[in-house]
């Protein structure tokens, strides 16, 4: 167990360093390519920080443990919205653009509703046990992801970017930016994998069920990249990248990751309840509501989001 604890700490350190490199590389690349930090957050950063969820979900589905795959995504999105945005806002209030509130956030709400609908083949009890996310469902999710990517790139206007002179742009080395992004992503993936593997081993030894591990420890470990990246970005005054990372990751997790996983191997849901699915939707709606207030998530609002997650976590542990 001591080795597990040491490796967990090493994994967290790697994730934090990776987040710093990824944020720096992504911000510089956005300025060099003359696109907004929000677009970089919604695409490059979100895709990179969602890599652990993709790896865990695909492997767990192929190994015949689909409740871990679904629980991982549902738990990660709840944690992204409540903990990552909550903690980030408590560190530094997050400024949110009107475009994000009106056009970007609805994508995560629609994606969450779509997942709930596809997961409800039949509703015979409080639990969703036995419901299936089929290959057709997976293809529908992938179509939704294609629509999201089309929209994101269609709004990547030059007017959203920070204006820079030609000389300033030339000082930014594109290859160095890409190297920082790749190095940051590598540290994020390896570090989160160390965390998930060792934390899951400890939880398993304590008799925690697979679905709860997926909703909490695995979801928390695979959300470490988003948490570290968003906090670092907000601390550096790059709120657009911080919120773009969360929104993009939530959409990637549902539409791309579950879409790909279900297409490769249809997933029978086990251990996920309507409380989990409802919390997924409620958390995003609450963030959307807070974002309308002065187009900013204040520190007290971040505290409310974090407190809601702690209440949800207590409910999960109580029902183990």
Image (cartoon, rainbow, N blue to C red):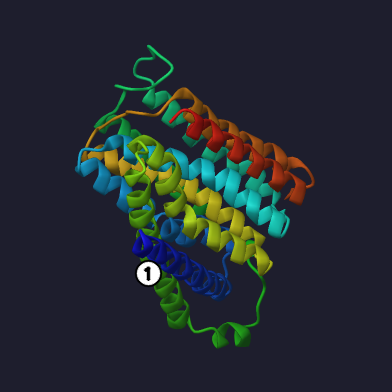
Reading the image, the residue beneath label 1 is 186
Coordinates of residue 224 in the picture (x, y in percent) = 48, 57
Question: In the rendering, at what x and y percent does residue 285 appear?
Answer: 62, 34
Q: Position of residue 35 (x, y in %)?
A: 57, 66
> In the visual, does 68 lie left or right of 221?
left
- Foreground pick, 253 / 87: 87
Label 1: how many Cα within 10 Å (few below 14, some 14–19, many 20+): some
Q: Quadrant of the N terminus?
A: bottom left
Above or below: residue 115 compared with residue 233: above
Determine whether 36 is above or below 81 in the image.
Answer: below
Which residue corresponds to the image point at 42% horizontal and 81% vertical from the top-left? Answer: 175
Please state which of residues 203 and 276 is positioned toward the viewer in this rendering. 203
Residue lying at the far right in this picture: please name it: 294
- Could you tell whether 11 is left or right of 56 in the image? right
Whether residue 298 appears in this view of the structure is no
Q: Residue at 67%, 66% (x, y): give it.
A: 235
Q: Describe residue 136's horizontal placement relative to residue 119 as left or right.
A: left
Viewer-proximal residue among 47 and 214: 214
Is 38 or 5 nearer to us in this picture? 5
The image quadrant that residue 233 belongs to is: bottom right
Give coordinates of residue 27: x percent, y percent. Answer: 57, 71
Q: Secondary structure at mark 1?
A: helix
Q: Quadrant of the C terminus?
A: top left
Counting labels gives 1
Q: Can residue 222 be seen here?
A: yes
């Amino acid at each position: 167990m001591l080795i597990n604890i040491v490796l967990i700490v090493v994994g967290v350190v790697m994730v934090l360093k990776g987040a710093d490199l990824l944020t720096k590389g992504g911000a510089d690349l956005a300025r060099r390519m003359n696109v907004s930090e929000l677009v970089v957050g919604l695409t490059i950063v979100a895709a990179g920080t969602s890599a652990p969820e993709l790896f865990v979900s695909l492997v767990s589905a192929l190994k015949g443990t689909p409740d871990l795959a679904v629980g991982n995504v549902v738990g990660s999105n709840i944690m992204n919205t409540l903990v990552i945005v909550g903690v980030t806002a408590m560190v530094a209030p997050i400024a949110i653009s009107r475009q994000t509130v009106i056009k970007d956030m609805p994508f995560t709400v629609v994606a969450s509703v779509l997942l709930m609908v596809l997961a409800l083949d039949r509703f015979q009890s409080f639990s969703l046990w036995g419901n299936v996310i089929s290959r057709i469902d997976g293809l529908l999710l992938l179509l939704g992801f294609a629509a999201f990517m089309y929209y994101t790139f269609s709004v990547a206007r030059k007017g959203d970017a920070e204006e820079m002179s030609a000389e300033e742009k030339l000082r930014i080395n594109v290859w160095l930016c890409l190297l920082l992004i790749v190095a940051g992503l590598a540290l994020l993936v390896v570090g989160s994998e160390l965390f998930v593997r060792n934390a899951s081993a400890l939880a398993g030894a304590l008799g925690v069920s697979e679905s709860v591990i997926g909703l909490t420890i695995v979801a928390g470990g695979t959300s470490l990249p988003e948490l570290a990246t968003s906090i670092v970005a907000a601390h550096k005054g790059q709120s657009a990248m911080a919120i773009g990372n969360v929104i993009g990751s939530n959409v990637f997790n549902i539409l791309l990751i579950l879409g790909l996983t279900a297409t490769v191997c249809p997933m029978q849901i086990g251990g996920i309840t309507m409380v989990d699915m409802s919390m997924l939707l409620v958390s995003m709606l609450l963030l959307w509501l807070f974002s309308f207030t002065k187009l900013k998530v204040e520190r007290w609002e971040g505290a409310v989001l974090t407190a809601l997650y702690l209440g949800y976590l207590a409910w999960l542990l109580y029902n183990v």
